[in-house]
Amino acid sequence: IYHFLRPYKFLIIAYITCSIMSGMWNIFNSTLLKIIIDTLTHTEASSDIPQLLFWPSILFLVNLIVYDFSWRGVNIINLKIQPLIKNDITQYAFSYLAKQSYQFFQNNFAGKISSNINILSHNIEIALNELSVHVIRCFALLIASLVTMYCVNPQFFFGLLAWAIIFLGLSFLSSKTIMKLADQYANCESEVSAVIVDSISNSQNVRIFARNHFELTNLTKTLLPLRDKFRQKSVFMLKINIMRGLSITTLLGFMLYTLTKLIETKDITIGDFGLTN
């Protein structure tokens, strides 16, 4: 992938910067929310509240604007580089195929080769356009959250750190299975595409020799594995999503319990409820 990204390294740096800025939005807003709540709690004279809340409120709105513009930056950069990268991948794959022997084309359907090129281009597009920005911003958010939690109380820090290690470890182990299932499903898609393309290209022979039934039977044989692989992949992803939901619920439960205990001992302020959210 680096081979295709290297010509756009400055745009990639800007892309990473915008992704990190979008991830910092929640931390900054939570900090400002803590300041606002603590100010309202500890200020007795109501006439002083507007003056004390003026700058936190302004910064709260500015942070929302920065958050929105950082996402628009990500969109603009994708708009600039995604079509070029897809074209580069297609041309690279075509050049690679041109170097192959005649036996290679005898062993592989034209439809399968075309489908594999499209799948490769589509997967890289998804990785760069949809997955990478969330990976970058979530990693930046995790680091910032750990620092923030440690400043509030070390108990939050160690709880979040333990959850992050377990969650990331299980995610890494699951990613291997997800990649394997995705590859199997992509191969089935290529097989279906190969059968359809080659059947259409031989449509005249199919009509002459009345082989419609044979072609439909051959297509059905490739559709059944495609259906099974889709279900297998979807069931595994369902299990992963259930596990993720339970882990987040457990983390929030721990945070709420710790907040309640620490507020009783006055080790934290009311505003920390907003900060640890």
Image (tube, rainbow, N blue to C red):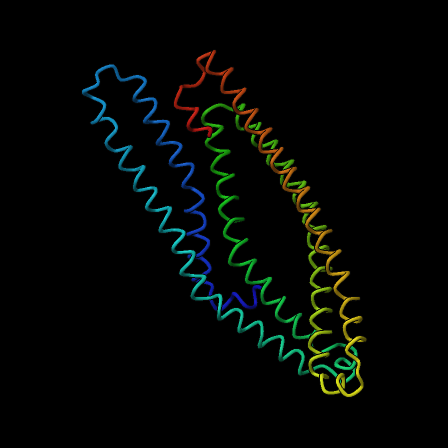
In the rendered view, would you say 34 is above or below 266?
A: below
Q: Residue at point 48% right, 46% down? A: 137
Query: Which of the 4 image quarters holds residue 26?
Result: top left
119 or 263, which is in the foreground? 119
Give the image location of residue 96, x and y in percent.
Answer: 65, 78
158 lies left or right of 7 = right
Q: Residue at point 66% right, 42% down? A: 240
In the rendered view, would you say 78 is above or below 243?
A: below
In the image, farthest residue toward the left: 47
Give the image location of residue 169, x and y in percent.
Answer: 66, 40
In the rendered view, would you say 60 is above or below 53?
A: below
Give the image location of residue 66, x and y in percent.
Answer: 34, 47
Q: Residue at point 49% right, 66% down? A: 82
194 lies left or right of 136 = right
Q: Residue at point 40% right, 32% down? A: 30
In the rendered view, would you say 271 is above or below 116?
A: above
